[in-house]
Amino acid sequence: MQKRRCERRQTSDKNPEAWVCFWGEESPHWLKNRRKEDRAKMEVFNDYAYYYNAFYQDKDYSMEAVQVDTLLKRYGKDISTIINFGCGTGRHDIELSEMGYQCTGIDQSSLMIDIAKANARQADKGISFLEADIRDFKTQAQYDAVISLFHVMSYQTKNEDIRKAFRAAREALREKDGLFLFDVWYGPGVLSDKPCVRVKEIEDDKNKLVRIARPVMHDKENVVDVCYEVLVIDKESGQTKMINEVHNMRYFFRPELEFLLEEAGFELIDNLDCRTLRETDFDSWTSYFVAKTV
């Protein structure tokens, strides 16, 4: 009978204590020998980079960077320096750097920062990536724009969390005409087309990966708990690795964001559908919000 071993490991800032489980006679080296921390970190790094890139291989970072560039030019003035709140693996920053922007990225996950640095080295880009919490970030630099993509602001599920993130963004921006661009789950669209169970399967030469997402909605908090179960099945050995994560996502409405932005020292300029860059409606599941410093 195959043995099962589980251990809590940090895989990202969104799921700091995900359970990672293994079946089979042999467990990964970093579980068998915890004293070899350097080797352990590298294996976790490689594994998570593999899972992340596998499931988001169809994510069009180049197109999204073009959208960001379009919005920065449409609403901003002389934007050249950008800081990305919640930069993840740094793929957006690399694309924006190709367009001539001077980019900095922050993320509270050391693993994500390691991946971002590796991606930047591979792309031969001199991008600064820092480990930091967007709610508490302090800097002496004054950036032309703060961006926050991939719904990072929707992970700020408590009012105080989003307030802190907005204040940190305001403090990182230049006093005049600083621009704040972020995307969120958009309330009217989420409630019009409620989350449901979704299954995604992909495979390569070595593994078959199955991800099941089960949503739990909380009407009083405007939060959806997205419960992920990820199975990684080795085609040759049959060994199965399982990762369970819960991503808590808040959906927002324009009036509350307008209020919170004003409270932090911003003026809301516009919000647009993330797919079309046109006006939002009840089919808009995600929305860009654009604000400027006042």
Image: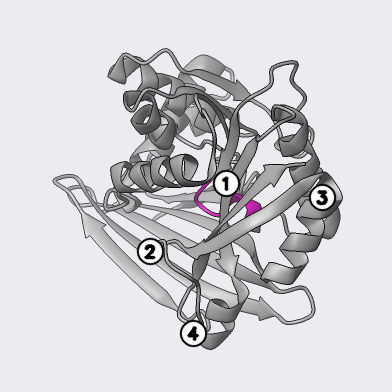
Q: In this view, does 123 lie above or below 91?
A: above
Q: Nearer the viewer, mark 1 or mark 3?
A: 1
Q: Is residue 26 above or below residue 83?
A: below
Q: Horizontally, is 93 left or right of 218 in the view? A: left
Residue 25 image position (x, y, % from top left): 37, 44
Who's the residue at 34% across and 50% down the image? 56
Residue 151: within the magenta? yes
Who's the residue at 75% across and 43% down the image? 165
Q: Distance between the residues labelled 1 and 3?
A: 15 Å
Give the number of the disc on residue 193.
Answer: 4
At label 2, counting other C-alpha atoms closer than 10 Å, the crowd grade (few under 14, some 14-19, many 20 or more) is: some
Quadrant in the picture for the C terminus? top right
Give the number of the disc on residue 181.
Answer: 1
Give the number of the disc on residue 294.
Answer: none
For marks 2 and 4, the one nearer the N-term is 4
Q: Mark 2 points at which residue?
A: 275
Q: Nearer the viewer, mark 2 or mark 4?
A: 2
Q: How far apart are marks 2 and 1 (CA)?
A: 15 Å
Q: What element carries label 1?
A: strand
Q: How far apart are marks 3 and 2 (CA)?
A: 26 Å
For the image, the number of numbered tags is 4
For marks 1 and 4, the one nearer the N-term is 1
Q: Is residue 182 above or below residue 230?
A: above
Q: Name the residue under label 3.
A: 163
Q: What element carries label 4?
A: loop
For marks 3 and 2, the one nearer the N-term is 3
Instruction: State if disc 4 and disc 2 touch (CB < 8 Å).
Output: no
At label 4, counting other C-alpha atoms closer than 10 Å, the crowd grade (few under 14, some 14-19, many 20 or more) is: few
The residues colored magenta run 149-153
User: What kind of residue is marked 4?
Assistant: Asp
Between 204 and 6, the residue placed more toward the observer is 204
For marks 3 and 4, the one nearer the N-term is 3
